[in-house]
Image (cartoon, coloured by chain):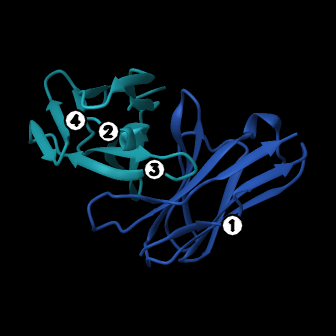
Amino acid sequence: QQQVKQSPQSLIVQKGGISIINCAYENTAFDYFPWYQQFPGKGPALLIAIRPDVSEKKEGRFTISFNKSAKQFSLHIMDSQPGDSATYFCAASMVGGSARQLTFGSGTQLTVLP
Amino acid sequence: DVKVTQSSRYLVKRTGEKVFLECVQDMDHENMFWYRQDPGLGLRLIYFSYDVKMKEKGDIPEGYSVSREKKERFSLILESASTNQTSMYLCASEHPRTGFGYTFGSGTRLTVV
C-alpha cells in the first residue's frame, strides 16, 4: 500500500533548466512533507520541508509547492546544475505509535546534463 | 558533525544464515529506524525504536527483528536470510523534538545468495 506516489521515475534536464518532481498523498493525517536528496553511495539527506498550512517554501534554488485540497506537493529546482544530479525522495510524516514515521515516495532519478 | 555509522558497506550472506546489521549514532537521539531501499519502491520502514529496549514494527517487519540494548546502537537481525532480502538497508536516527529531520547512515548493501 503506497501512501505517497511520486513521479516521474526519472528526469533528464539541461543545465539551467527547471526540474519538477511531483508527489501525491492519500492520508490526510500527514502533517509534514520533507524532501530528501540522495547521492550515489550515500544515505538520503534532508533537503527542504513544508507544513500543510503553507502553500510554498523556498530555499535557494529549491522550492516546494503544496496544494492541500488536491493532496499534492512538488519540488521545483530552478537553474538546475549537474551537481543536482541525484535521487530525490518526497516523504510524508505523521505521528504513529511512539515516534513520527516517514513514508517515502518511490524516488526520482534526476540527471542534469552539462 | 553528527553521524550515523553502519558497520558494513557491503555484505554477502548465504540463504538461511542469521545476519546482523549494526547501526551506531553519536547524536544522543532517542528515535532510530531501519529502512530498506529497493528500486522503484523507495524506502520502506522495517522497524523503529523510540527508546532503549523499545521497538515497534514498521510496514514490512516480516523476516526481521531488532535489538536496542544501548541508546546509541540499533541492530537489525535477519533470522534466516532469504534471497528476497537482498537489498540496500538504511539506518536513520532522529531527535524527537528537533523537527522531523532524519539523519541517515550510508547504507549496507546486502546480497543473499
Mark 1–mark 2 contact, CB under 8 Å?
Answer: no
Looking at this view, is A3 or B21 the one in front? B21
Q: Please tell me if label 2 and label 3 are on a single chain.
A: yes
**Mark 2 vs mark 3: which is more N-terminal?**
3
Q: Which residue is mark 2?
A: A81
Looking at this view, is A99 or B23 the one in front? B23
Mark sitting on residue A79: 4
Q: Find numbered disc 2 in the image and state the secondary structure of the residue it sits on.
A: loop
Mark toward the viewer: 3 or 4: 4
Above-or-below relation of B69 to A93: below
Chain letter of the residue carrying label 2: A
Q: Colour of chain A?
A: cyan
Residue A28 percent across, percent down from the top left: 24, 32
Disc 2 crowd rating (10 Å Cα; few below 14, some 14-19, many 20+) is: some
Q: Amino acid at mark 3?
A: Pro
**Mark 3 vs mark 4: which is more N-terminal?**
3
Mark 4–mark 2 contact, CB under 8 Å?
Answer: yes
Above-or-below relation of A113 to A48: above
Give the residue drawn at x 31%, y 31%.
A15
Q: Which residue is mark 3?
A: A44
Chain letter of the residue carrying label 1: B
Disc 3 crowd rating (10 Å Cα; few below 14, some 14-19, many 20+) is: many
Q: Colour of chain B?
A: blue
Q: CA distance from mark 2 to mark 3?
A: 19 Å
